[in-house]
């Protein structure tokens, strides 16, 4: 198959399936894990910032955050300077998941890339990052 879209979609589905299996013991779904990755990087983001960073729909993020709040992983608080804005904060249990969940994701990445040399891995990741940036930059196009 020579379709970049087909291969990227197929690879993403396989990655997601493997990740789902590996993080399920922590009570996490892939969408929650991706949200946690952003909050572990920068706690206190707004829902809008999470939507922009993860390239998801508003309704998807709202549902993910509601489940995470229900499960005790995040809390939402109104911004001290603008009461219309809600910030999303990690809870202690979410902070405690950082190391084991990240380790599980790294194991999935390692398995998926195990047939590649170090140089091939670097090149693949660099090319994937370029394609993502190209596509993010072209959102307003036809």
Image (cartoon, rainbow, N blue to C red):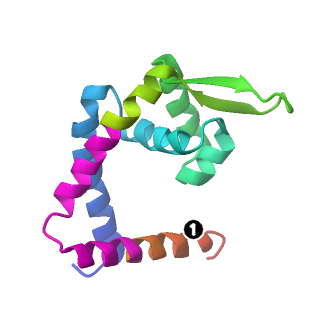
Of 92 and 61, nearer the camera is 92
Q: Position of residue 91 (x, y in %)?
A: 53, 22
| Residue 105 within the magenta-colored segment of the rendering | yes
Query: Is 57 on the left or on the right of 12, as rendered?
Result: right
| Residue 32 within the magenta-colored segment of the rendering | no
Toward which corner of the image does residue 61 lie, by quadrant?
Answer: top right
Number of numbered discs overlaid on the protein picture: 1
Relative vertical location of residue 32 with respect to residue 127 in this rendering, above or below = above
Query: Is 31 on the left or on the right of 7, as rendered?
Result: right
Mark 1 = which residue? 136
Relative vertical location of residue 5 with respect to residue 73 in this rendering, above or below = below
Relative vertical location of residue 109 with respect to residue 21 in this rendering, above or below = below
Give the farthest residue toward the right.
81
Q: Position of residue 142 (x, y in %)?
A: 61, 76
Q: Position of residue 140 (x, y in %)?
A: 66, 70
Which residue sits at x=27%, y=62%? 11
Q: Which residues are magenta?
A: 101-126
Of 46 and 106, nearer the camera is 106
Which residue sits at x=24%, y=27%? 25
Classify the position of the N terminus by image quarter. bottom left
Q: Secondary structure at mark 1?
A: helix
Q: Magenta residues: mostly which secondary structure?
A: helix
Of 31 and 129, nearer the camera is 129
């Amino acid at each position: 198959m020579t379709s970049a879209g087909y291969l990227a979609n197929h690879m993403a589905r396989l990655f997601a399936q493997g990740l789902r299996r590996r993080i399920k013991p922590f009570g996490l779904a892939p969408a929650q894990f991706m949200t946690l990755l952003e909050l572990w990087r920068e706690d206190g983001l707004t829902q809008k910032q999470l939507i922009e960073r993860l390239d998801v729909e508003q309704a998807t993020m709202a549902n993910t955050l509601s489940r995470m709040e229900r499960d005790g992983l995040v809390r939402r608080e109104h911004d001290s300077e603008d009461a219309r804005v809600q910030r999303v904060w990690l809870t202690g249990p979410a902070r405690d998941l950082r190391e084991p969940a990240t380790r599980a994701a790294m194991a999935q990445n390692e398995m998926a890339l195990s047939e590649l040399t170090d140089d091939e891995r670097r090149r693949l990741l660099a090319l994937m990052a370029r394609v993502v940036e190209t596509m993010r930059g072209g959102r307003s196009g036809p």
